[in-house]
Amino acid sequence: MINLVSRADELLESKAVQVVIGYEAGSTGKARPAFITDPSKTGSLIFDDRCVQNLAVYLTKKEVRYFGKAAIVATLPIMRSIMMLISEQQVFAENIVVLGVSAEGKYIDIAGIEVMQQYIATCDLGNPAKDQETLAMLNKMSTQQKFDFWQKELSKCIKCYACRQACPMCYCTRCAVECNQPQWIPVQSNLHGNTDWHILRAMHLAGRCISCGECGRACPVNIPCHLLTMHMADQVHNYFNVYAGTTDKMSSVMSTFEPNDKESFIQ
């Protein structure tokens, strides 16, 4: 943490960046996002087990871009999110300084995109172990059992869209669910509309989800919606041997054709 704080202080003092995006302790003891512009405030930065939010979600927000060049405290999921955002031209590498944090909570000096890409390549990019167990359980279910499971879970959805707001890859300025001419997705919270929304979102994240689980954590009614996107991440890897967020030049699996692609998924 000392290295992280000193590096943040150095970047702000030298005006190499105008804001540091990291974590600080909230009034209830929980970690919350911090947007630090004053070098004297970098001492409030923390990093521990409470720091789980995917901070990359703020990189596309106009309120944050207003500050100028940003340094961001980045764990593996955040680094992968940054790679995806760069590859989709939503942010630019020259406008970001990455303050890397390893799985053990140690500061990593990320000198540039190439260094970050090399670090990502050394990491396990599969879904988190606890989610792998649940996904394996779901995959053993019959089609009807899976359908019943998700109908029960999605019936709880209140259409607050917290899952969308928490996701770095849901950056559209106007979402399809907010269009009413024509209306693609029912606005009201009912089983039909809820199912449409969550399936639509999972499909939009195919090949783009980096398995941070932030959508599931954000859900106020505890729907494990992250399992839908993580399942899609598994499918993309199984069929196309691709993990999202490994390079700043990712191709879209939903719009890229390779002659050697498996086609069994069409059946």
Image (cartoon, rainbow, N blue to C red):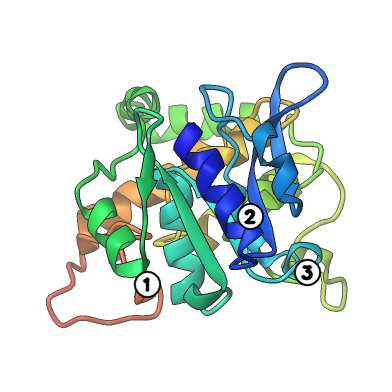
- Label 3 and label 1: CA atoms lie apart by 22 Å
- Label 1 and label 2: CA atoms lie apart by 17 Å
The answer to which of 67 and 83 lies nearer the viewer is 67
Which of marks 2 and 1 precedes in the sequence? 2
Amino acid type indicated by mark 3 = Lys
In percent of width and height, residue 89 lies at: 53, 79
Q: Going 37% across and 60% down the picture, which residue do you hit?
A: 245
In percent of width and height, residue 164 lies at: 68, 51
252 lies above or below 5:
below
- With 235 as the anchor, is 69 left or right in this view? right
In percent of width and height, residue 10 lies at: 56, 54
In percent of width and height, residue 64 lies at: 75, 62
* Residue that label 1 marks: 248
Amino acid type indicated by mark 2 = Val
- With 149 as the anchor, is 40 left or right in this view? right
Which of marks 2 and 3 precedes in the sequence? 2
- Label 3 and label 2: CA atoms lie apart by 11 Å
66 lies above or below 124:
below
Which of marks 1 and 3 precedes in the sequence? 3
Q: Residues within 10 Å of mark 2 (few under 14, many from 20)?
A: some
Amino acid type indicated by mark 1 = Asp
Q: Residues within 10 Å of mark 3 (few under 14, many from 20)?
A: few
Q: Secondary structure at mark 1?
A: loop
Q: Residues within 10 Å of mark 1 (few under 14, many from 20)?
A: many
- With 91 as the anchor, is 3 left or right in this view? left
Q: Are marks 3 and 1 in contact (CB under 8 Å)?
A: no
Q: Going 31% across and 28% down the picture, which residue do you hit?
A: 136
Which label sits on residue 62? 3
Which label sits on residue 57? 2
Quadrant housing the C terminus: bottom left
Q: Secondary structure at mark 2?
A: helix
